[in-house]
């Protein structure tokens, strides 16, 4: 039996603003360890006993995240991952259908389907539950993992288990988020589990189920996958076919049908107690973070003085908290958020207000990742902007031109290969060049260490959309 990880990596967690943004969502952030949630998910099966694990995870995501996902997987030693790019978000049932179609190209593995943005603190317990679920899945069951509840939680949906099946239970019922009294009854009954959103089944079994219950989704995904474009790094779907695909979740499209009509398929819930959290808000991150004796959790350069049960999350500078209790403080280079721990769900209201005002703070960080590296907009004013730009070894920016701005480049580390008009030349550290408005230009790193430059832009308009590309290694038309 071969187990293959399917990682679902779409969407953005607005309740984790300002760390999570639309163009750089929470799964790409290192919230618990030095690795991002995506990276932690990708290696979650490492060392799984008794099963053969496919070393190439299959990631379903969108165009916007493709390069940073590929780079993050490369950083942790994942070679040749399969990355399926959805041109439109269509929820988890179409995403899993695409993954199953791709997996069947190399056999019929058991798929372990995991959201990219969850936290598991007890890896041993997680792998034990996966081992139990894999045996059921190999026998044709559609398995979901139910988190053993440790409190009456109103923020999660629940699953009711029925009669015992091996190490699991019959999938008896899905229920929506309950009120507190109902959640307490669920907890006391011992029959209910939190809905984790983690699933396991053979690729062929999922395709058979989606064809039975949602043939419209199955047909649209099959057409989109059949019309995929050849690409060395990504699986690109036929856009028109996928645009016609309905949006639905794995639960609604298939699993709930099994609960109400078990004769149509074998649905099983396997209990899991592995320190799971979907990290839906900052208080949830505090709950799964390591804490000091007073219950304080800090990330980055932080200092606590007479504080209790407080989370401080610093990205770029020292943050000192004095006399805080049950507070959340999140610092990024361009925004700071302070909230009481009981009000973290209301962060989404702040995001909604910023969007209504047309503020870009909900979309991107000051530091922006590109396929060639990243840049940080360190200063800006009327008619000027200063960026710190880092280009990865062997990478290069597009051959481009700007209508409204000129640029000065100063090399501070590494060696730059510069195209400036008709000339191509090398610049060493402490050397510079000036690129007049309207000149064709390109920056490349021919060396083996990261290239770092300071770019000073000046002109009447400094937006990122003032780029005319003539040639691009990464197939971009903008950005």
Image: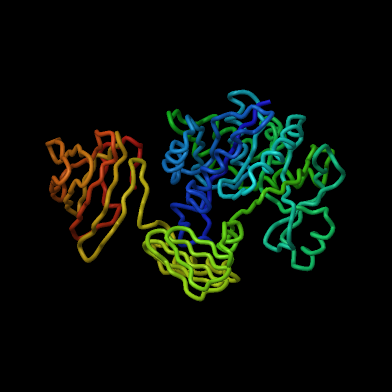
Q: Position of residue 11 (x, y in %)?
A: 53, 51
Q: Quadrant of residue 441?
A: top left
Q: Is residue 114 above or below residue 343?
A: above
Q: Position of residue 68 (x, y in %)?
A: 42, 43
Q: Is residue 157 visible?
A: yes
- The residue at 76%/34% (across/down) is 136
User: Does residue 160 appear to the left or right of 89 in the view shown?
Assistant: right
- The residue at 62%/37% (across/down) is 97
Q: Looking at this rendering, what residue extends furthest in the front direction? A: 293
Q: Is residue 435 above or below residue 313?
A: above
Q: Quadrant of residue 96?
A: top right
User: Does residue 349 appear to the left or right of 444 in the view shown?
Assistant: right
Q: Is residue 252 visible?
A: no
Q: Is residue 3 above or below residue 428?
A: above
Image quadrant occupied by the N terminus:
top right
Q: Position of residue 414 (x, y in %)?
A: 23, 40
- The residue at 23%/57% (across/down) is 386
Is the image coloured rainbow, by chain, by secondary structure, or in one colour? rainbow
User: Does residue 38 appear to the left or right of 363 in the view shown?
Assistant: right
- The residue at 20%/55% (across/down) is 457
Q: Position of residue 384 (x, y in %)?
A: 21, 61
Between 432 and 43, the one nearer to me in the picture:
43
Between 316 and 203, the one nearer to me in the picture:
316
Q: Looking at this rendering, what residue extends furthest in the bottom direction? A: 323
Between 446 and 263, the one nearer to me in the picture:
446
Q: Looking at this rendering, what residue extends furthest in the right direction? A: 163
Q: Is residue 94 above or below residue 363?
A: above
Q: How many marks?
A: 0
């Amino acid at each position: 039996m071969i187990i293959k990880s399917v990682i679902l990596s779409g969407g953005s967690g607005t309740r984790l603003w300002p760390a999570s943004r639309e163009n750089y969502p929470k799964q790409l952030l290192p919230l618990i360890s030095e690795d991002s949630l995506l990276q932690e998910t990708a290696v979650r099966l490492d060392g799984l006993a008794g099963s053969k694990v496919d070393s190439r995870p299959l990631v379903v995501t969108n165009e916007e995240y493709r390069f940073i996902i590929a780079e993050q997987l490369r950083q942790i030693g994942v070679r040749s991952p399969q990355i399926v790019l959805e041109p439109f978000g269509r929820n988890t049932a179409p995403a899993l259908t695409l993954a199953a179609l791709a997996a069947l190209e190399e056999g019929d593995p058991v798929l372990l389907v995991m959201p990219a943005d969850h936290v598991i603190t007890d890896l041993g317990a997680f792998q034990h539950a996966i081992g139990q679920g894999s045996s059921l899945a190999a026998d044709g069951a559609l398995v979901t993992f139910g988190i053993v509840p440790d409190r009456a939680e109103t923020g999660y949906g629940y699953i009711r288990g029925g009669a015992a099946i091996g190490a699991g239970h019959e999938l008896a019922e899905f229920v929506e988020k309950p009120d507190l009294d109902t959640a307490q009854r669920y907890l006391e009954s011992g029959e209910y589990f939190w809905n984790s959103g983690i699933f396991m089944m053979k690729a062929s079994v999922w395709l058979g189920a989606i064809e039975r219950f949602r043939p419209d989704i199955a047909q649209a995904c099959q057409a989109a996958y059949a019309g995929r474009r050849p690409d060395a790094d990504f699986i690109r779907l036929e856009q028109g076919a996928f645009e016609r695909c309905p949006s639905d979740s794995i639960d609604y499209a298939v699993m709930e049908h099994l609960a109400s009509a078990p004769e149509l398929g074998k649905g099983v819930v396997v209990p899991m107690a592995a320190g799971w959290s979907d990290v839906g808000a900052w208080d949830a991150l505090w709950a799964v973070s390591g804490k000091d004796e007073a219950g304080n959790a800090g990330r980055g350069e932080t200092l606590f003085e007479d504080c209790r049960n407080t989370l401080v999350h610093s990205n770029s500078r020292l943050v000192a908290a004095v006399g805080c209790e049950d507070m959340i403080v999140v610092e990024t280079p361009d925004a700071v958020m302070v909230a009481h721990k009981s009000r973290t769900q209301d962060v989404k209201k702040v995001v909604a207000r910023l969007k209504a005002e047309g503020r870009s703070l909900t979309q991107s960080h000051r530091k922006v990742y590109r396929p060639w590296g990243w840049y940080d907009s360190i200063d800006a004013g009327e008619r000027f902007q200063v960026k710190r730009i880092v280009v990865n070894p062997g990478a290069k920016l597009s051959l481009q031109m700007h209508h409204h701005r000129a640029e000065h480049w100063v090399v501070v580390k590494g060696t730059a290969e510069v195209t400036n008009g008709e000339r191509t030349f090398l610049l060493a550290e402490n050397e510079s060049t000036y690129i007049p408005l309207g000149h064709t230009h390109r920056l490349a790193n021919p060396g083996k260490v990261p290239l770092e430059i300071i770019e000073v832009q000046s002109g009447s308009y400094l937006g990122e959309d003032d780029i005319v590309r003539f040639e691009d290694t990464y197939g971009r038309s903008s950005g």
